Structures are given as C-alpha cells and as structure tokens.
Image (tube, grey):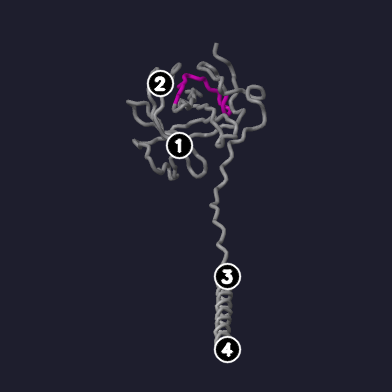
Amino acid sequence: MSMTIAVVLGLSIATVILLLAAFVATTRQDRKGRRPAPPPEIPLVPAPLAAPVTAPGVLGSDYDDPRTIKVGDEIECQGLRSRVLGAMHISWQGKQWTQYLLDDGSRRYPWLSVEVRDGLLSTDPPHLEVLLWADVPTQGMIPAKSMLIMEGVEFFPIERGTASFKSEGDSGQPDRGLLDFAEYRAADGRLLSFERVQGKAWTASYAQPLPPGSITFVSRAP
C-alpha cells in the first residue's frame, strides 16, 4: 500500500512539474511574439501665415495716415496728384472700410480703399491695408462661387457678401444702399474684386497693395 501511495505521489509531482514547464514556455513564447504598439501618429498642422509686416515708421508721424483722407483733399499717390471726389463708407459683419473715388486727370477715376484688418492670429496686431484699384473690362462676366479665369490668370474666391454703404461727395453712387461684392486672389497674390450696387451691373477691378508712405497730402479740404 505504501509503495502504491509513493508511486501516485511521484506521478502527481511529475505532472505538476510538466504543467509548470509548459506554462513558463508558453508565457515566454507569447512575450517574444508580442511587439509594443507603435505610438499614435500626430497629424502635421501647417504653420499659419504671418500677418503683413509694415515698414518702419510711425503712422501719422513719419508718414501721412490714409485713414484721415477726406472728400476734397488733394493727395499724391505713386507720383500722381489726385483729388478725392467722393467716398463710400462700407460696413459688413462688423467690419468697416472706406473707398475713395480719385480724379488723377486721366479720366480713369480709380478707387482707393483703406481698411484696418485684424491679424491672422489673435496675437497679431491689426494692420492697415491700402489698395489702389484699376478697372478691368468684364464684358458681362459675373462672379463665380468657384475659381475663375481672368486674362489667363486663375483666381480663387476668398470672400463674398452683401454690405451696406453710405456715400459722401461725388461718388457716383446713391446716398446709401447695399453693395454686393466678391473677392478673389491669384497664386501670385494678385487681387480681383467684383462689386455691384444693387440694381446696377457688376464691375470688376484689380487691386494693387500700397506700402506705408505711398500716400502724401498735397492740400487738405477746408
């Protein structure tokens, strides 16, 4: 009887040892087979464009401030003297800007727009944008909501809407009303704008940005 018990105990111990060995081998194999999960990919976010940089100098001190232009002033812009015939004070979604109708003696009557724009980032300071507009023959074109081609150049939409305006002086427009507009930008930074005082036809013009100091006052209106 004692020998039988010894044999059973021996077999039991051997079985336990085999089971433990198999468990350890399986655990090691499982650990070898597993690879650490790769870290999650972080999407690359392109850096935002910087706000326009102004030239050195103090506005209103080192050079004349275009925001103080009034109807009746005589100014010099790009070497040409012009008289300010009228103005349109425009408001849209909390933004305000002014367009001045100029008479430079060429009978082209260009428009000069002056606007204080916010920076692209909340930490960027506002900057002054002064644009000189030249008419473009549109031949009945209307502004598209997608890319359009003007004189062989592709322009992409950036902003459009309907603004309210009030006129001053001889602007050629009603005293007040609504102005539809659509603005586009080309890959080289060129600007194109369509405008239409409601009830009239669309007109188009190219914009030429002017650096600080481009506007000087020759005489001021009384």
Disc 2 from disc 1: Cα separation: 21 Å
User: Which mark, by number, is residue 192?
Assistant: 1
Are the two marked residues, 3 and 4, in contact with CB atoms closer than 8 angstroms?
A: no
Task: Tell me the magenta residue range.
Answer: 76-91
Earlier along the polypeptide chain: callout 4 or callout 2? 4
Disc 2 from disc 3: Cα separation: 83 Å
> Which amino acid is tagged 3?
Arg
Disc 1 from disc 4: Cα separation: 106 Å
Label 2: which residue? 172
Foreground label between 2 and 3: 3
Quick one: quadrant of the C terminus? Answer: top right
Disc 1 from disc 3: Cα separation: 65 Å
Foreground label between 1 and 3: 3
> Which amino acid is tagged 1?
Leu
Badge 1 marks a residue whose secondary structure is strand
Earlier along the polypeptide chain: callout 2 or callout 1? 2
**Residue situated in front as seen by the camera: 93 or 73:** 93
Q: Quadrant of residue 17?
A: bottom right
User: Which mark, by number, is residue 3?
Assistant: 4
> Dot 2 surroundings within 10 Å: few (below 14), some, or many (20 or more)?
few
Percent x, y of residue 119: 56, 34
Foreground label between 4 and 2: 4
Indicate whether residue 88 is drawn in magenta. yes
Residue furthest left in the image: 199
> Which amino acid is tagged 4?
Met
